[in-house]
Amino acid sequence: MCETALQKATIPFDGRVQSGVEQPPQAHLEVLGMNLEPSLDQAAFIELLKDLTATARQLTQGNPIPNFLAPEMVAVTANLTITCGFGERIFDFLGKPELKPEGLHDIPAFKLDQLQERWGQTDLVFQICCDDPGTLFAAGRLLLAKCQGKAKLHWMQKGFTYAYGSAPRGTTPRNPFGQVDGTVNPSTAEEFSEQVWLDGTGEQAYLDGSTIMVLRRIQNFLDPWELLDRPARERVIGRKLSDGGPLSGGGEFDEEDMDAVDEAGNFIIDRRSHLALSREHEDDGSDKLRRRAFAYDDAPEPGQSDLTNSGLVWISFQRNPDYQFTAIQKRLDMHDLLNKFISHIGSAVYWIVPGTSAETYWGQGLLEK
């Protein structure tokens, strides 16, 4: 592999849909949750979006940024993507609540949730992904500087997955439990159209090429997990640790056999396993979605007994969370064997605005409607 393979590696910015959704996850993630300043009016909001869109376009394509005095910090593009989304409140701010896409609202409460406001809903989200941590830092810092006085940072969530070159591009990442995580995903244009991208014509043209992001922060309890032996860990998930294949046989992408039994007549894949419950979908496949998860590993909280503070910045994209994410999570919340080892501590939902052309800005179809 060329030593400078990442230096000029770019992913297109403009198009019908935004980048950072269909692409395989880059090595590093930084998500910025921003709230509009109370003094900001609609005209200033539009100017902010124009500035941020232009800046993101230049950053991701490796082009000069006017009045930016540290271009060396972003000289390596390293597959940088910057994806913008609006929280539900933006539609109220614009005086257009009736234009909210279906499913753009808080995820219903689940009995096992331990949600913390510090990881909660914000007005705006910027998902920044890159294969170089230096470029990621500089891009995030520049966006924050552009927002100063107009939008304030509520939280920043960082994550990681395979480093560039350590595994073939598109390899399903492993979570902190060591499990292959994210096997079931759309892979064709038809599947993305059915599961992820909204279409719109006429009065709903502003929706065309958009999607809805669900962001969950999921804490992993590694201390009790690591007391389990390998067979017990595999039973909880329903997949082999070695390659992510279902316990019923085959490789990672082979269909599971939920009716397979062992010599004693017991189901090989436990009906309460994570695989069984997450894949127990309706025949129309309406609860499939695009998963794009990153691990996090932060310093332990004061007084925390676990050795580490680790988990997932778990991101999904779908046409309507009510029939996709929420449908899946309802089943998991009730019976999932994994629930003993995880806790959902953050939740937010965003409308990921359509893609842009060289002359347009993020959300223009809505703002100028």
Image: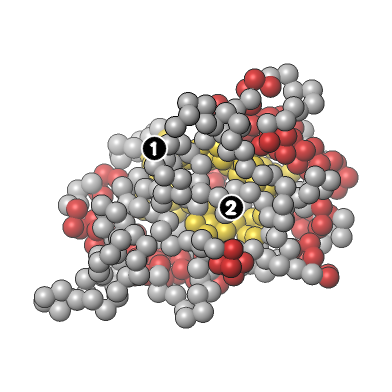
Question: Is 340 situated left or right of 52 in this image?
Answer: left
Rendered image quadrant of residue 58: top right
- Identify the residue at horizontal 35%, vertical 45% (top origin): 176
Few, some or many residues within 10 Å of mark 1 (<14, 14–19, 20+)? few
Callout in the foreground (2, 1): 1
Counting from the top left corner in percent of width and height, residue 294 is at 46, 45
| Three-letter amino acid code at the position of disc 2 | Val
Q: Which residue is mark 1?
A: 166
Q: Which residue is mark 2?
A: 21
Counting from the top left corner in percent of width and height, residue 136 is at 58, 32
| Three-letter amino acid code at the position of disc 1 | Ser
- Identify the residue at horizontal 74%, vertical 63% (top origin): 207
Question: Is 283 situated left or right of 202 in this image?
Answer: left
Which residue is more in the foreground, 309 or 18?
18
Counting from the top left corner in percent of width and height, residue 177 is at 31, 48
Counting from the top left corner in percent of width and height, residue 88 is at 69, 58
Q: Using the image, tell me which numbered label, if any, was put on residue 328.
A: none
Which residue is more in the foreground, 254 or 18?
254
Which residue is more in the foreground, 233 or 53?
53
The C terminus lies in quadrant: bottom right
Determine the secondary structure under disc 2. loop
Which residue is more in the foreground, 138 or 156?
138
Rendered image quadrant of residue 244: bottom left
Residue at the far left in the pictured view: 264
Say if 321 sits above or below 302 in the image: below
Say if 362 sits above or below 244 in the image: above
Residue 241 in view in this figure: yes
The N terminus lies in quadrant: top left
Say if 319 sits above or below 347 in the image: below
Question: Is 368 situated left or right of 160 in this image?
Answer: right
- Identify the residue at horizontal 81%, vertical 41% (top origin): 50
- Identify the residue at horizontal 82%, vertical 52% (top origin): 364
